[in-house]
Image: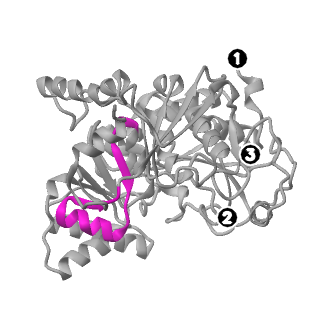
């Protein structure tokens, strides 16, 4: 019987197995940041255990980084302490750190792919749930907890049961104005937030094959929001072209050898999955969430459902929405384009293309936060900065920012934010803040109009 992409990568990394139990999985790359690593470092220090393979670890500062005046001392004491602790721990353990101000600094799931650290066929972990982003390259990538961070520090391995296999196929041609973010929001809305629990998901079909790497990263990033351990897309020429020439990518003959191996990773035709779902690309429209989990999503042409359910009604109460209403023409005062889901250069190009020659509505605070220093540099070099500034948008410095409001980038209580981030939980973007998840195109259109609009009617 044939093997799936997931099987091939997983099986190649099994060090040992417990009979009828978990397996010991070798981890190629361990990504760390300032939030989940301090406790793990402390545990090893207390137990006098050295870091097994510091060369396999890459650190960056992202969650607590301010997005204004990054050259100045950090005002927030908690943020300052966490970043100082990361610097100290990395120095003591000879771990590469791209700290605040470094040219390679950025959100961990943005900077690792753009530097060529992320490569097909790898196993990658990070103390962050959206590590699934890297699965866009055909890697097994997933988030781990603090105790598992310590496990990887100590052994470069993890003791894990092998997840089941799920495949989601989307075939056909996407409508104009439908972006990868809409594709994954549609899938989660159709399947629910628990549909992927216990599975690793492979995305297959025309739609994913025709996506850019940035788009694939957006899709895999949100796999976790349907409960999956991670998401993967088979590496192909699009993947190889993206990786080639990047800072830490293999070079010359070594790259050619790697590509020959990477080509063997595709799922075999006779491989089987534990669960499969299929969708038609033509059924997908620009999406919006109306509730307090990413599965509560509707097409721009649809109205909020009218089901009778306590948690559903609690969500609507928090959002101050009513059953059966449309979100079109809903006034919005905040727009956030950023996060590890949508802060790559492609996202800003799409937004800039829409706002060019237009003006932001006077009632809207529109924050643009690049995912890395390199993205920020590209925004400037490509002239996108002028487009945004002329339209009245505020371009900030790289970081996680208003995705999770761990710094001063918070949405005020009771305010709506159309956000390109990945979670719309209660209080996620600030206490009492109301988050509506959407694509960069929907966010840009909302900022210009000061309300949610069906922008597809205005596309050429």
Front disc: 1 or 3: 1
Query: Who comes first in sequence, dot 1 or dot 3?
Result: 3
The answer to whether residue 450 is left or right of residue 47 is right
The answer to whether residue 229 is left or right of residue 390 is left
Gap between marks 1 and 2 measured at Cα:
35 Å
Front disc: 1 or 2: 1
Is 54 inside the magenta-drawn segment?
A: no
Q: Position of residue 342 (x, y in %)?
A: 51, 42
Gap between marks 1 and 3 measured at Cα:
25 Å
Question: Residue at 35% of width from left, 58% of height from top?
Answer: 161
Residue beneath disc 1: 460
Q: Residues within 10 Å of mark 3 (few under 14, many from 20)?
A: few
Q: Position of residue 91 (x, y in %)?
A: 17, 65
The answer to whether residue 146 is left or right of residue 433 is left
Q: Which residues are magenta?
A: 136-161
Numbered disc 1: secondary structure: loop
Numbered disc 2: secondary structure: loop
Tag shown at residue 362? 3
Question: Residue at 81% of width from left, 60% of height from top?
Answer: 320
Query: Who comes first in sequence, dot 2 or dot 3?
Result: 3
Residue beneath disc 2: 412
Q: Position of residue 447 (x, y in %)?
A: 69, 42
Gap between marks 2 and 3 measured at Cα:
17 Å
* Residue 103 visible to an observer of this rendering: no
């Amino acid at each position: 019987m044939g093997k799936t992409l997931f099987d091939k990568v997983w099986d190649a990394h099994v060090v040992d197995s417990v009979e009828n139990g978990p397996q010991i999985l070798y981890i190629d790359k361990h990504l760390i940041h300032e939030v989940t690593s301090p406790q793990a470092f402390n545990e090893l220090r207390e137990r006098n255990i050295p870091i097994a393979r510091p060369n396999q670890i890459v650190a960056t500062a992202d969650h607590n980084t301010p997005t204004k005046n990054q050259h100045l001392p950090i005002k927030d004491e908690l943020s300052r302490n966490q970043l100082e602790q990361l610097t100290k721990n990395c120095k003591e353990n000879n771990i590469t750190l791209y700290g605040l101000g470094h040219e390679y600094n950025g959100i961990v799931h943005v900077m690792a792919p753009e530097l060529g650290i992320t490569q097909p066929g790898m196993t990658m972990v990070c103390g962050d749930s959206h590590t699934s982003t890297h699965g866009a390259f055909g890697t097994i990538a997933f988030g781990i907890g603090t105790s598992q961070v310590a496990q990887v520090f100590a052994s470069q391995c993890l003791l894990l049961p092998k997840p089941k296999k799920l495949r989601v196929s989307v075939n056909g041609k996407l409508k104009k104005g439908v972006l990868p973010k809409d594709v994954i929001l549609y899938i989660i809305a159709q399947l629910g937030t628990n549909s992927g629990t216990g599975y690793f998901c492979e995305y297959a079909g025309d739609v994913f094959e025709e996506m850019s790497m940035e788009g694939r990263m957006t899709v895999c990033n949100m796999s976790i929001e349907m409960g999956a351990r991670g998401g993967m897309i088979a590496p192909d020429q699009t993947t190889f072209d993206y990786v080639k020439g990047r800072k830490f990518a293999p070079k010359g003959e070594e790259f050619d050898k790697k590509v020959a191996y990477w080509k063997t990773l595709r799922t075999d035709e006779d491989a089987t999955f534990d669960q499969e779902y299929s969708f038609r690309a033509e059924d997908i429209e620009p999406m919006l969430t109306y509730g307090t989990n990413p599965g509560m999503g509707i097409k721009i042409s649809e109205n909020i459902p009218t089901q009778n359910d306590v948690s559903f009604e609690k969500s609507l109460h928090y959002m101050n929405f009513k059953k059966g209403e449309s979100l079109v023409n809903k006034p919005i005062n905040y727009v956030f384009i950023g996060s590890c889901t949508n802060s790559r250069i492609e996202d800003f190009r799409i937004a800039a293309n829409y706002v060019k020659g237009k003006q932001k509505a006077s009632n809207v605070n529109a924050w643009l936060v690049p995912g890395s220093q390199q993205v920020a540099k590209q925004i400037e070099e490509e002239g996108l900065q002028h487009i945004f500034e002329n339209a009245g948008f505020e371009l900030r410095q790289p970081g996680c920012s208003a995705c999770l409001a761990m710094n001063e980038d918070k949405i005020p209580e009771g305010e709506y934010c159309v956000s390109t981030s990945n979670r719309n939980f209660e209080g996620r973007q600030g206490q009492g803040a109301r988050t509506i998840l959407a694509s960069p195109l929907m966010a840009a259109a909302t900022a210009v109009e000061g309300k949610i609009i069906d922008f597809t009617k205005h596309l050429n």
